[in-house]
Amino acid sequence: MVGMRDMEELISTVPEKETAEYLHEAFVCYGAGAYRACVVLTHIALFEGLRAKLNAVAPVNQAAKTIVEIIEPEADAQRVFEKTLIDKMKAGQIISQLEADILHQLNRQRNKAAHPSRHRVSAEEARFVFSEAVTKFLSQPIRQTSVLVDEICARLSGPNFFPAKRMEDVRLIVTQETENLDPAATPLLIKGLVRLIDGSDEGTADNAHLFLLGLADQKDPAIRNHMVRFVITPKSSSETDIRRISELIAQDPEILKDVPPASRLRLMTLLRRNLEETVNNKNSLYNSRSNPAQILARIIEENGEDFVVDHFNEYALEVIDTTPTAPDFIKSIKNAPQLLGRLQENYRLEAGHIKFGHANAFARVLPGIDAELSDASSDEDAWRLLVAVTKAERIGAFDAADLAKGKFQSLPGLRTKALTFAVTSPDQAFRFVTESGSPATGLEEFRALYFDPELPHPTA
């Protein structure tokens, strides 16, 4: 409960001097037991303070300017203006519905106190009116809504709005641009950004898209809700923004949990179309925001494998069947056993492929992913993969042969795990060797051929 000391401290939170003077008089009345006078003076301070705040921002806030032009003549003529002021501030989105309700309540309490009635103002009521007026309104700045949104959108055409496209730089700029933006204006901003993406030149549209990504990066549940309503849901039925939608999902994968089922179904189609467009660049474009493997990795990291399997299984399997080999992808899928198992199968197929192009391409990337892949692999996975490489070596794949002839010493992580499996499960290990078509008559012969550094490879 607010006490006298609290009331006095509240006065210091009001920046406008004249408003603070009214509040001081109200405080003195309260201390003298004149609670009715305290309510009336607090009411004067409240609405004079709101007028002062509106006048201060009117030059840069169109909503405030419009209200000032309506209210000031009424106030100057000493006509009742309070209810009109409240309604206009609500209509201009300067205050919320809840704030408008509070102001109407304070206005009614003042009327009961100021006019002859049987209502007796208590100390508790006076303290309540005083506290609500100061904490909810007089100590707060005027909400920046549509005008600030308009300013941001107008400047997005500038070629240097985002000097760099790295997410850490985008995040910094978006945070600074929105630091004075009231949360109530977020829907207006998102809708404005969407309009720029749809109807502007490419540079402005790209900047608006980056701004959306910066907002999504904040991982704010309220922002996420607005993104679903004004971006994801309406655009999921179109194919014109496949890349932008894919990047937005990658930036905040948790947004998928808020997407309605029908829109989620449409999104999977868009993600699969994005996969079709980039499948031939599966490795070189992994760092691209719209790369399918990176999108899948982010969804798994944020939402878990169960969510992916339940809602985006077709997309996930299609991505994995492109056999992405980016180290970061392998790290991300490490804790998704079903999807990792499918990826391991694809790796074995590529490693032992009968077409030299496939086998050699995979053999060339293996040393670069040895650390991540060995960390994500079981001992059995490692053994089966290296056995598959020896299959490609026997049919003449040169890059696979280089790994095998080098006794897999360029793959220290996988080699260690593979040898562990050969020691702990020799019968099963040799069964995999036999299934690969190796002519080795026993496990020891196979190990001597491909794993024993003391013995030269016959064709080395």
Image (cartoon, rainbow, N blue to C red):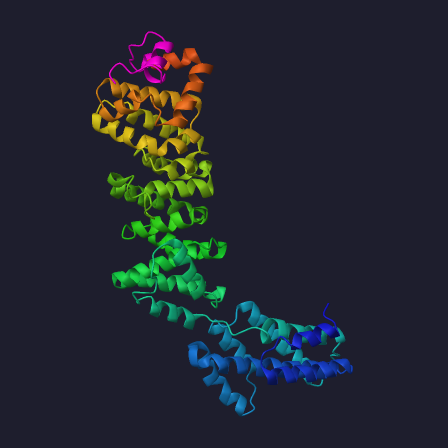
As drawn, the residue found furthest toward the bottom would be: 77
Residue closest to the eye, 210 or 241: 210
Residue closest to the eye, 351 or 271: 351
Residue closest to the eye, 285 or 262: 285
| 124 with respect to 390 (left or right) | right
- Please provide the residue range marked out in magenta: 434-460
Residue 230 visible in image: no
The image quarter in which residue 346 lies = top left
As drawn, the residue found furthest toward the front would be: 454
Residue at the (35%, 46%) spot, across then down: 267
Determine the main secondary structure of the stretch shown in magenta.
Answer: loop
The relative height of residue 261 versus residue 162 in the rendered view (above or below) is above
Residue at the (45%, 70%) spot, across then down: 145
Provide residue 451's location: percent of width, then percent of height. Answer: 36, 18
Residue at the (57%, 86%) spot, across then down: 80
Taking the magenta stretch, the answer to whether it contains residue 172 is no
Provide residue 54's location: percent of width, then percent of height. Answer: 50, 80
Residue 268 visible in image: yes
The relative height of residue 405 versus residue 114 in the rendered view (above or below) is above
Provide residue 152's location: percent of width, then percent of height. Answer: 38, 68
Taking the magenta stretch, the answer to whether it contains residue 453 is yes
As drawn, the residue found furthest toward the top would be: 441
Provide residue 333's location: percent of width, then percent of height. Answer: 42, 35
The relative height of residue 280 versus residue 214 in the rendered view (above or below) is above
| 128 with respect to 307 (left or right) | right
